[in-house]
Image (tube, rainbow, N blue to C red):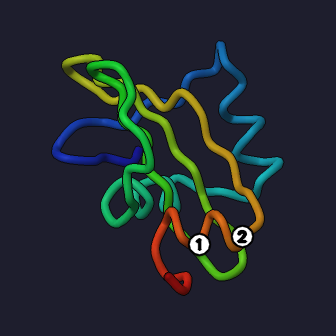
Amino acid sequence: MATWKGRELVIDHMRNVDREMVECGITTDDVVNALEYGVTPSKRKKGIIEKWLRTGWFINMVVVEDCGEYWLLRHVTRIKVTKRLLNLVGGGKK
């Protein structure tokens, strides 16, 4: 099982996150990488963290919820890089 910040990372099956991971080709290692090295594009409500990490021509987006004893993986997706997203994530011309 994957861990982040000393707590277990639990996949939310009620929101079909496991299916999203298979469709996008994202593994739990990719999720942990995004959480550790990704950027936060916008502020979410308290207890919810959203991170984006660029990998090649795609951006992996990960949303987790702090449940105290563990992290609940709420959403994952992969989107294609555009110029606007490059400026938001970093790495585009300013």
33 and 91: which is toward the camera:
91
Instruction: Spot the residue most to the bottom.
Output: 93
Find the distance from the CA under tag 1 to the CA under tag 2: 7 Å
Q: Is residue 90 above or below residue 4?
A: below
Q: Is mark 1 on a helix, strand or loop?
A: helix
Residue at the image point whose x is 65% and y is 82% from the top: 56
Q: What residue type is labelled 1?
A: Leu
Q: In which quarter of the image is the N terminus?
A: top left
Where 83 sits versus 73, above or below?
below
Please state the total of marks drawn on the protein image: 2
Q: Write the residue at 73% across / 69% down.
A: 82
Q: Is mark 2 on a helix, strand or loop?
A: loop
- 52 displayed left or right of 17: left
Q: Mark 2 points at which residue?
A: 81
Residue tagged 1 = 86
Q: Position of residue 58 (x, y in %)?
A: 69, 70
Which residue corresponds to the image point at 65% horizontal and 13% vertical from the top-left?
Answer: 14
Q: Quadrant of residue 9?
A: top left
* Viewer-proximal residue among 65 and 14: 65
In the rendered structure, which amino acid carries the disc numbered 2?
Val
Q: Position of residue 2 (x, y in %)?
A: 39, 48
Of residue 49 and residue 33, the one placed in the foreground of this image is 49
